[in-house]
Structures are given as structure tokens and as C-alpha cells.
């Protein structure tokens, strides 16, 4: 049995359609990701470009929680805004070694490409001695 040209054309499998499907899925996930993105109040209305948003966020953190502020009060405010420390982390401000390490609380939004807002600080005697904000995009 001999097949004609039309038979051969129908039996050929598409070679590159999977690339279009993967691209469309990626775009759909990215669009959905942005649609439900959450932003902490301290991170709202930052510039669109990361290289401009990073120093703006750092400045905002330093203004809101200046050196000398109570660390416990800052932690409370950040928790209310949705920031989290390490799992089940409760600061022990009385522990001497607590003052020697950098502490941080993070807020992440998104699934595929995650936006990170992080507040990091050092303290002594329950008071912030040094503080800075970190903002960026985390990709898989």
C-alpha cells in the first residue's frame, strides 16, 4: 500500500509547538504571580527598577526604625506587616549572644519570581544599633 503526500503530511508530528506551549505557560504563571502579589506597607510604592528600589527601601527602613529604637517594638510592627523570622523564631532579647549576631525578618511575595523585602539589624540591650533594608527579586 502506497501512501500519498497528504498522508505523510498528516503523520508528521509538530517539532516546535512544545516551545510555544512552555512559553505561554510561563507567561500565564508570571501574569498570575503578579496579580496576587502582596506588598508590606513599608515596601509599598518603591521605584520600579530594583537598582533604585533597593536604596529607597533601605532609607525607608532606617527612617522608620532608627538606631536607638526598641528592637521588640520593631519586631512587633514587622510581624503585623507580615514579616517573618526563622520558623518559630521568638527573639530572646535577654540572651547575651543575641546581640552579637545579625537578625533579620523577611517578607516574600510571589511564587515563580519572588520579591524579597528584608529588614536586618544588630542590637545591644534591646536597642537597635545598626539597621538596613534589603530589597530584590529572587528567581529560580
Image: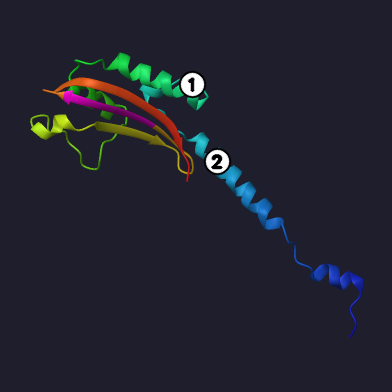
Label 2 or label 1, whichever comes before in sequence order: 2
- Check disc 2 and report the residue beneath it: 30
Horizontal relation, residue 16 to residue 74: left or right: right
- Check disc 1 and report the residue beneath it: 52
- Asked if residue 98 lies in the magenta stretch, the reply is no
Q: Which residue is drawn at 17% across and 19% down?
A: 70
Residue 84 x, y percent position in the rendering: 28, 35
Residue 102 x, y percent position in the rendering: 23, 31
In the depicted structure, whether residue 71 falls above or below residue 11: above
User: Are there few (<14), some (14-19), or many (20+) residues within 10 Å of tag 1?
Assistant: few
Q: How is the image coloured?
A: rainbow
User: Are there few (<14), some (14-19), or many (20+) residues within 10 Å of tag 2?
Assistant: some
Q: Which residue is drawn at 52% across and 25% down?
A: 49
Q: Describe the element under mark 1 as helix, strand or loop.
A: helix
Q: Residue at x 21, y 26 (%)?
A: 122
Q: In which quarter of the image is the N terminus?
A: bottom right
Range of the magenta residues? 117-123
Amino acid at each position: 500500500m502506497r501512501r500519498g503526500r497528504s498522508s505523510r503530511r498528516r503523520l508528521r508530528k509538530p517539532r516546535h509547538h512544545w516551545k510555544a506551549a512552555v512559553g505561554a505557560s510561563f507567561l500565564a504563571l508570571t501574569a498570575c504571580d503578579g496579580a496576587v502579589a502582596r506588598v508590606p506597607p513599608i515596601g509599598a510604592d518603591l521605584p520600579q527598577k530594583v537598582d533604585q528600589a533597593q536604596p529607597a527601601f533601605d532609607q525607608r527602613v532606617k527612617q522608620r526604625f532608627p538606631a536607638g529604637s526598641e528592637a521588640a517594638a520593631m519586631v512587633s510592627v514587622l510581624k503585623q506587616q507580615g514579616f517573618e523570622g526563622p520558623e518559630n523564631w521568638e527573639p530572646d532579647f535577654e540572651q547575651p549572644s543575641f546581640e552579637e549576631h545579625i537578625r533579620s525578618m523577611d517578607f516574600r511575595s510571589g511564587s515563580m519570581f519572588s520579591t524579597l523585602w528584608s529588614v536586618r539589624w544588630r542590637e545591644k540591650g534591646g536597642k537597635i544599633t545598626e539597621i538596613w533594608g534589603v530589597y530584590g527579586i529572587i528567581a529560580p
